[in-house]
Image: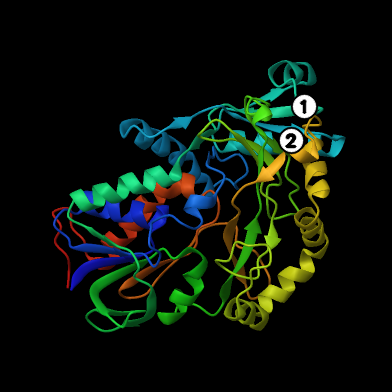
Amino acid sequence: MTDITIIGGGIVGIATAYELLRRFPGISLEVLEKESQLALHQTGRNSGVIHAGIYYAPGSLKADFCRRGLEATLRFSAEHGIAYEQPGKLLVATSPVEMERLAALEGRARTNGLAVRRVDVAELREIEPNIVGLGALLSPTTGIADYGAIVRRMAALVDELGGQVTCKAEVRNIEERANDVRITLADGSIRTTRHLVVCAGVMADRLAAMCGLGGDFAIVPFKGEYFRLAARHDHVVRHLIYPVPDPALPFLGIHLTRMIGGYVTVGPNAVLSLSREGYGKLAADLRDLRDMARFPGFWRTLRANLSSGLGEAANSAFRHHYLKACQRYCPSLELEDLLPHPPGIRAQAVLRDGTLLHDFLIRNSARTIHICNAPSPAATSAIPIAGHISDRAADAFGLKPEGALSR
């Protein structure tokens, strides 16, 4: 019997474990991760960006978590000797319409308390000679991190604080009872815990349903495909280069990202994935397909985003389509510069009416807390998310600073 069990060994789950043990010493805590290693999915396959929070609606959890998360991620990395950089981000407008959107983004960023400034054509040409555009918005605090290394360090700290991280522990069933929660693993073994926190990423809806908290939303997986630029382009940009997003579309668009390690990637696109955890181009999972087909919100989302979805599919199928998206603001790139790079899959929560959930969705039952939707920038925001979950756990589970726990 543990006091708290956490399902999920990505950055949100591990950060939550670390924060709970720091705040409430003396509790017994175990993290269950179904893979053989931590951070193998969204955490280990994202763009590595530490976002500043330019895009997010003022007053949203996204805006708050991201703003605080940038500082917390930088601080944790510095304190533990984990590589990071702050090259800053340029959102580059390439049309008059995008210049208007840039002005709106600038206003939103300032409302969110972010230090941003406009860059005109002449300055853009000076600071980024390989980038073309009518103007740009500079976010000087945006950075890059090694999120996999952050998770590994946090997991070591969880161990030092008396917690336990168990890999190869896939959850097959959750039974919430009056005095405890019974967890059945794939190998047939049983874990019993007084309270449960679920940070399951692409499996969040299935585990929430086991506790009676699902049904009105489903996770729809979107694959983000990246390319790594040829070595001759390792210094093609000094900043992170982003397009100005279309507010009618759910994702940010293909961007150039300097990575920890000194190389540059382009991506991601956003294509519907036929498997929640299958990364090959033709990967498909029958259960995942069946669950999508049975959920009415999936078809409504598909209809609402059909045009943009077909464009993303063309980018996926034909490298020259992908290249054109990059050449809008970096015309020196050529087809042979696009080298293979591991893709990622984003867990996107969709409501029954087809609405894409853009903010965090966290639900409670009597003995469980479920992070049902943790959209980008969840990696940036992981430390304040962990604080928020710990606050909720303190109230819901009766945690005290000295580690006492109401039974």
Residue 37 higher or lower than 396, as above or below: above
User: Whole-percent x and y of residue 263?
Assistant: 59, 33
Residue under circle 1?
135
Q: Residues within 10 Å of mark 1 (few under 14, many from 20)?
A: many
- Depth check: give the residue in front, 20 or 271: 271
Lateral position of residue 98 relative to residue 366, left or right: right
Q: Is residue 271 left or right of residue 182?
A: right
Quadrant of the frame with the C terminus: bottom left
Q: Is residue 85 visible?
A: yes
Res. 24 image quadrant: bottom left
Residue 405 lies, in percent from the top left, at 17, 65
Contact between labelled residues 2 and 1, with CB atoms less than 8 Å apart: yes
According to the picture, the residue beneath numbered tag 2 turns out to be 102
Seen in the image, is 50 located left or right of residue 76?
Answer: right
147 in relation to 136, above or below: below
Residue 30's place in the image compared with 259, above or below, is below
Which element type, helix, strand or loop, lies under badge 1? Answer: strand
Residue 72 as seen in the image, left or right of residue 19: right
Q: Which residue is drawn at the image coordinates 67% and 80% (left, top)?
A: 293
Q: Residue at x 44, y 44 (%)?
A: 147
Q: Quadrant of residue 265?
A: top right
Residue 353, picture quadrant: bottom right
Who is closer to the viewer here, 226 or 182? Answer: 226
* Residue 399 position (above or below residue 214): above
